[in-house]
Image (cartoon, rainbow, N blue to C red):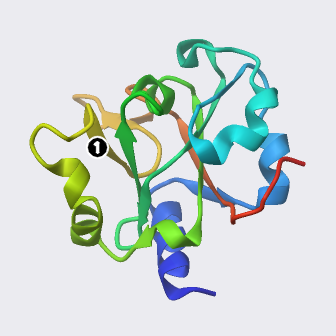
Amino acid sequence: MNPLRQQFEQRLVQAGGSVAALAELDSLLTGKVFVSAHPVCRPWAARATCQDPREADVALTGCDAMIAETGSVAVFSGPVEGRLSTLTAPTHVVLGSEAQLAADMETVFERFADRLKPGASPASLMFITGPSRTTDIEKTLVLGVHGPKKLVFVFVEDGDRAG
């Protein structure tokens, strides 16, 4: 296995996320499903049962990079991938390929330097590490208050198609 992939998967799981096989993707797309316009999601566009991610039980999105060091996914928001698609559904399923792996955050910034220049940058570059979590004043950890309660990553490769 690719060492960056192995590290990414381990760190994602440590952060509370999970990794699923491509063969499991259909079983993850249950209830009201939002499918983003990201090119990697196109083969699953027919699985969408709602157009508004705020109404979805599951949001299927792509990503722009994955960071092995932290188990994070990097997503530019903008016309293709809006912020709501990664924040509002209780379950967020992210698709990406090994070619998008980066060792660390610095590598991501170098890779996308042209998109991060003043005036050229998207609305935001989000780094998502596991499910949303917060603690209350009594230090009780709660998942899913400010974003998805569950984060699942699925590796796809060029030529993969919906099942």
Left or right: residue 10 compared with residue 120: right
Image quadrant where one finds the N terminus: bottom right
**Residue at (28%, 59%) from the top-left corner?**
112
Number of numbered callouts drawn: 1
Q: Residues within 10 Å of mark 1 (few under 14, many from 20)?
A: some
Locate residue 4, reporting x and y percent. Answer: 47, 81
Locate residue 71, reporting x and y percent. Answer: 43, 64
**Residue at (35%, 73%) from the top-left corner?**
69
Foreground of the two, 111 or 12: 111
**Residue at (47%, 32%) from the top-left corner?**
80
Locate residue 11, reporting x and y percent. Answer: 45, 68
Give the labeled residue for mark 1: 125
Q: Is residue 60 above or below residue 129?
A: above
Quarter occupied by residue 147: top left
Q: Is residue 138 above or below residue 56?
A: below
Foreground of the two, 70 or 45: 45
Q: Given the current orientation, which residue lies at the most extreme right position? A: 163
Q: Is residue 147 above or below residue 5?
A: above
Locate residue 7, reporting x and y percent. Answer: 48, 78
Q: Amino acid at mark 1?
A: Leu
In the structure shown, which secondary structural element does the residue marked by tag 1 occupy?
A: strand
Quarter occupied by residue 135: top left
